Image: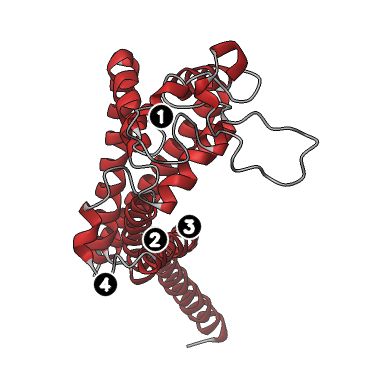
């Protein structure tokens, strides 16, 4: 074989080697692209994890505050006393809201971290159910305004009766009356429902025919809170009462406040709804990624 033939064979072998290398690199690139398309998104995973760990910690804090409040009142040592209160115990808000946030946060946090589709689906369904209930409640509140107003009136009057039964309820009523500059559900005379403030002749209480201090009109010149400012005030005429206490009911004041702050309130509810939808979308996206990766195993 002469030198020209050997040179020709050498060039042909180089072409074959180059073609094999190209084919191998093309297959390798296709495999990398296929693997890349099926992997779990780290940004979605850890964003959902961070989102839920904050939610989880807030839920634990709310739950802890609620249990601490019950422990201080002796409820944990005597669980039967939960039903003894005639009015609303504000601690229930911390217990229920904290419990729901803790469960949701745990499911979303651990589900995202461990890529557990069962926990992620539970998180999505539970959050979706809460969103649906909120939406339903909003629609019903808009349609049945009068019924909601009657229920609010009943709720306030029922708690007026139990004003002295629980310190947390007392603080909640005082805060409400001070914040909205109101007294009772419809007016000061609603305090006749309370055994300590009613005007019956057989009432031995010093607070007879009075109202709580939170009904009083604040005097800017007073540095020390006068907790006896409402004593005997309902023995006076309505015009004289207006000099010392707020005579508007809390139901009407709440309606006015809602109308004046409708955009802010609506914005808060829309923001909460968007957060819930965002959380559901993130969880479902992560579930899809996990399923895609498992399908390629």
Instruction: Measure how far apart labels 3 and 4 are at the Cα level.
Output: 35 Å
Nearer-N-terminus badge (2/1): 2
Nearer-N-terminus badge (3/2): 3
Q: On residue 51, which mark appears? A: 3
Residue on which the image places disc 2? 66
Instruction: Measure how far apart labels 1 and 3 are at the Cα level.
Output: 46 Å
Residue on which the image places disc 4? 77
Nearer-N-terminus badge (3/4): 3
The structure residue drawn at horizontal position 37% and vertical position 31%, both measured from the top left corner, is: 156
Task: Answer whether labels 4 and 2 touch (C-beta < 8 Å).
Answer: no
Instruction: Measure how far apart labels 2 and 1 are at the Cα level.
Output: 29 Å
Q: On residue 142, which mark appears? A: none
Q: Secondary structure at mark 2?
A: helix
The image position of residue 243, as x and y in percent, is 66, 20
Q: Is 142 or 214 nearer to us in this picture?
A: 214
**Other-residue count near label 3 (Cα within 10 Å), few / some / many at <14 / 14–19 / ≥20:** some
Task: Answer whether labels 3 and 2 touch (C-beta < 8 Å).
Answer: no
Q: Residue furthest bottom?
A: 1
Q: Is 227 or 145 nearer to us in this picture?
A: 227
Q: Is 272 or 254 nearer to us in this picture?
A: 254
Q: Secondary structure at mark 4?
A: loop
Task: Answer whether labels 2 and 1 touch (C-beta < 8 Å).
Answer: no
The image position of residue 59, as x and y in percent, is 41, 60
Q: Secondary structure at mark 3?
A: helix
Nearer-N-terminus badge (4/1): 4
Nearest to viewer (mark 4 / mark 2): 4
The structure residue drawn at horizontal position 65% and vertical position 42%, both measured from the top left corner, is: 226
Q: On residue 191, which mark appears? A: 1
The structure residue drawn at horizontal position 47% and vertical position 74%, both measured from the top left corner, is: 12
């Amino acid at each position: 074989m002469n030198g020209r033939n050997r040179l020709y064979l050498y060039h042909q072998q180089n072409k074959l080697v180059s073609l094999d290398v190209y084919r191998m690199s093309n297959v390798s690139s296709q495999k990398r692209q296929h693997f890349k398309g099926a992997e779990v998104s780290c940004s979605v995973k850890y964003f959902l994890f961070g989102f839920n760990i904050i939610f989880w910690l807030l839920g634990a804090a709310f739950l802890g505050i609620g249990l601490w409040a019950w422990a201080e009142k002796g409820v944990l040592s005597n669980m039967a006393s939960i039903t003894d209160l005639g009015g609303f115990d504000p601690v229930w808000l911390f217990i229920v809201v904290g419990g729901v946030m803790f469960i949701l946060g745990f499911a979303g946090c651990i589900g995202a971290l461990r890529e557990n589709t069962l926990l992620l689906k539970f998180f999505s369904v539970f959050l979706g159910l809460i969103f649906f209930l909120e939406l339903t409640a909003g629609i019903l509140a808009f349609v049945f305004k009068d019924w909601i107003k009657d229920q609010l009136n009943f709720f306030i009057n029922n708690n007026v009766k139990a004003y002295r039964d629980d310190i947390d309820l007392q603080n909640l009523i005082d805060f409400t009356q001070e914040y909205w500059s109101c007294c009772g559900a419809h007016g000061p005379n609603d305090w006749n429902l309370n055994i300590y403030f009613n005007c019956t002749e057989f009432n031995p209480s010093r607070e007879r025919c009075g109202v709580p201090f939170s009904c009083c009109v604040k005097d800017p010149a007073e540095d020390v809170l006068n907790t006896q400012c409402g004593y005997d005030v309902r023995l006076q005429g309505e015009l004289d009462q207006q000099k010392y206490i707020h005579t508007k009911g809390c139901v009407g004041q709440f309606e006015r406040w809602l109308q004046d702050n409708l955009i802010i309130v609506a914005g808060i509810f829309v923001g909460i709804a968007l957060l819930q939808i965002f959380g559901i979308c993130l969880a479902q996206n992560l579930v899809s990624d996990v399923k895609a990766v498992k399908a390629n195993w």
